[in-house]
Image: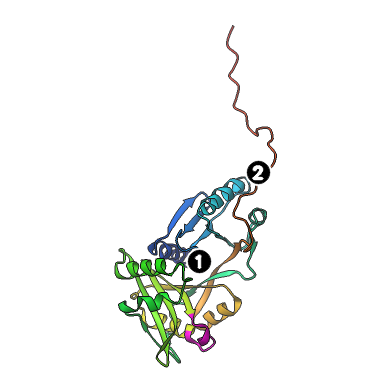
Amino acid sequence: MDRDDSLEVEAALDSERQFVLTLGGLALEVAGATLVTHERIPAARFNFVQELGVGPERQTAFFERALDHYFQRALRPTFRVPLPVPGHVDAGLRRFGFRPRASPLVLLLDRPGMERTSPESHEVREAGRDEVDLVASFWTAERERPEFRAALEVAWRHPNPHERLAPLLAFRNGEAVAAAIVYRYRSSAGIHAVATRPSARGQGAASDVVRYALGTDPVGKGVRYSIFADTPRLEERLRSLGFAPERSFVEFELPADAVLAIPPPGPAGPPNWRPPRAPPSPP
């Protein structure tokens, strides 16, 4: 990956954080990571730690600070660690009960000059302003849906400078079967939350939504598109649509039965540092 691609990757990651922020979340920067948080939508998609580099001598304090931030809010974060994962970071996360997911999370960018194609078997269009309930129905559980719907409507109708949001819908036989949200921040646009109704999976609806986004530029021209894949099968499919993998992460998550508590530090010991003694007074 050359320098220009590295800058594009950082722009894509920044755009993803801004997507969470515009939907009502927050991001707290600490030494070594960014803590992305959405207190009212407890999904892992909105609550993750983007690890930027933590030294072995500072990891215990870092993990305790990060976990305290989420556990006080009864949230279960995931930790995204770029490959290759440093041994001390892996060991530290495992000590706190986190385990790596089976497949890496891969960030893909569209290839400059790639061929743009049209949807093959579905009618795809931008959602109308009166379809916000239909759009929101593709994501979140019933409990979080009102919060997500309200945040989506605000970001959609009243975007901040440098951003634009466009929900997409795919139809088959007149029924909405897939959806996605394209979010632009400055010159980077992410294709987020691609979802298909269970009864319509395996028929190319999600691929047609992505094709439409790439072919019509719903958030304006002059952007580089990004999308995440969390399985090898999805990554391969996105490659066939014109994307190329640029950065991979291992996602560490807590088991469902894990208790949201930081382990005790162990028995007390002598201090590791003592203040210097004052020099003896002159006679």
Can residue 71 be seen at all in this image of the molecule? yes
Q: Residue at x 60, y 14 (%)?
A: 280
In the rendered image, the vertical position of residue 147 relative to residue 123, given as above or below: above
Where does the image place residue 132, in percent across and percent down from the top left?
A: 35, 75
Viewport quadrant of the C terminus: top right
Point out residue 176 in the picture as x, y percentages from the top left corner. Answer: 42, 85
Q: Quadrant of residue 104?
A: bottom right
What amino acid is found at the position of numbered circle 1 in the picture? Answer: Arg
The answer to whether residue 185 is seen in the rendering is no
Rendered view: 77 above or below 152: above
Q: Residue at x 52, y 51 (%)?
A: 72
Apparent side of residue 69 relative to residue 97 in the rendered image (left or right):
left
Closer to the camera in the image, 122 or 275? 122
Residue 93 is drawn in which quadrant?
A: bottom right
Secondary structure of residue under mark 2:
loop
Q: Quickly name the residue at label 1.
A: 45
Q: CA distance from mark 1 to mark 2?
A: 30 Å
Of mark 1 and mark 2, the one earlier in the sequence is 1
Outermost residue to the top: 283
Element assignment for label 1: helix
Label 1: few (<14), some or many (≥20) within 10 Å? some
Reading the image, the residue beneath label 2 is 265
Residue 209 horizontal/vertical position (percent): 44, 82
The amino acid on which the numbered mark 2 sits, given as a three-letter code, is Pro
Q: Which residues are magenta?
A: 196-205
Pick whichever, 10 or 154, lies toward us: 154
Quick check: 9 left or right of 270?
left
